[in-house]
Amino acid sequence: MNLLYFDTLPSTNLYLKENYQTLEHLTAVVAKHQTAGRGRLGRDWCDSDDLLMSILLKNDLDSNYLDSLSLVICATIYNVLSKYTTGLEIKWPNDILYKGKKICGILLESVISNHVECLIIGFGININHYDFPYELKNKATSLSIINEKTYDVKKIAQEVLIAFTNDFEKYLQGNKEYLTICKNNSCLIGKKIKYQENEKEQEAEVVDILDNGYILLKINNELVEKRCGEITLHNNFY
Ligand code: BTN
């Protein structure tokens, strides 16, 4: 376990992609600011005194892990943030929300040749972000807005790395605690949603989240397992 700090990087995920060969398994990188922070679906990730962190995995890898690891890190971050606030929910596949507003987004990336060289688990947790741009005001929040105080970002980075190292070990041993946390605190299970995949949108009901990281939906009275597409809730924010 190794934690590297930078003032500014284009992107912590990109840093690990470019340097994974010389870095150890479970090296984590934190930047105070990113100039080209990347979100899912090619979006940007804006930051302001937040936790911008990526963790490198090089051992015991399998490309099938990508989907379930997304749930493992969701559960880790959910547990760490729960020490600072109640009212958090997990939105499959990789967001943490507080009262419907996003407080954390996760972006998993991999480097694959003829095998999986490494997995990179990147996440942005809104910590001391106080002033979101107009278009995000109703969609995003931070620990600072929730509790009206500022936090030590490095301390939270250490807490997340220690907790994830422990959770990843348990995951490799077959422990499914991460799944229970994701299911019990899901904002989707039992809800009617719009499920969007490859630009096609369908109505569905969320039945369950599976341990392979897939979501179980009921579409036109049929049960179907889906990998991470884009989920949209009815009458909702995202
Ligand atoms: C999302 O779209 O919700 C995922 C956002 C992930 C942002 C984090 S910030 C640290 C890491 N480095 C990046 O460039 N992206 C991730």
Image (tube, helix red, strand yellow):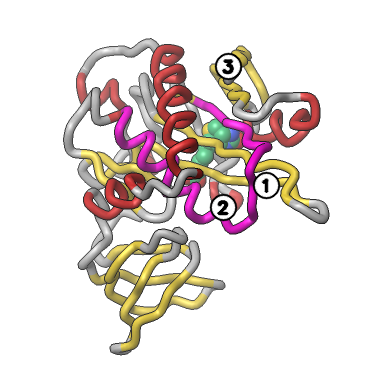
Q: Image point 31% across, 80% down: which residue?
A: 218
Q: From this view, report whether residue 194 is shown above or below residue 145.
A: below
Residue underneath mark 2? 66
- Closer to the chain start, of discs 3 and 1, is 3
Three-letter code, disc 3: Leu
Ligand 1 rendered quadrant: top right
**Mark 1 vs ligand 1: CB under 8 Å?**
no
Residues 39 and 135: in front is 39
Q: Quadrant of residue 30?
A: top right
Residue underneath mark 3? 3
Residue underneath mark 1? 110
- Residue 229: image x %, image y %? 49, 65
Measured Cα–Cα span from mark 2 to mark 1: 8 Å
Horizontal side, residue 174 vs residue 217: left or right? right
Q: Is residue 57 magenta?
A: yes
Measured Cα–Cα span from mark 2 to mark 3: 22 Å
- Quadrant for the C terminus, please: bottom left
Q: From this view, report whether residue 221 is shown above or below residue 76.
A: below
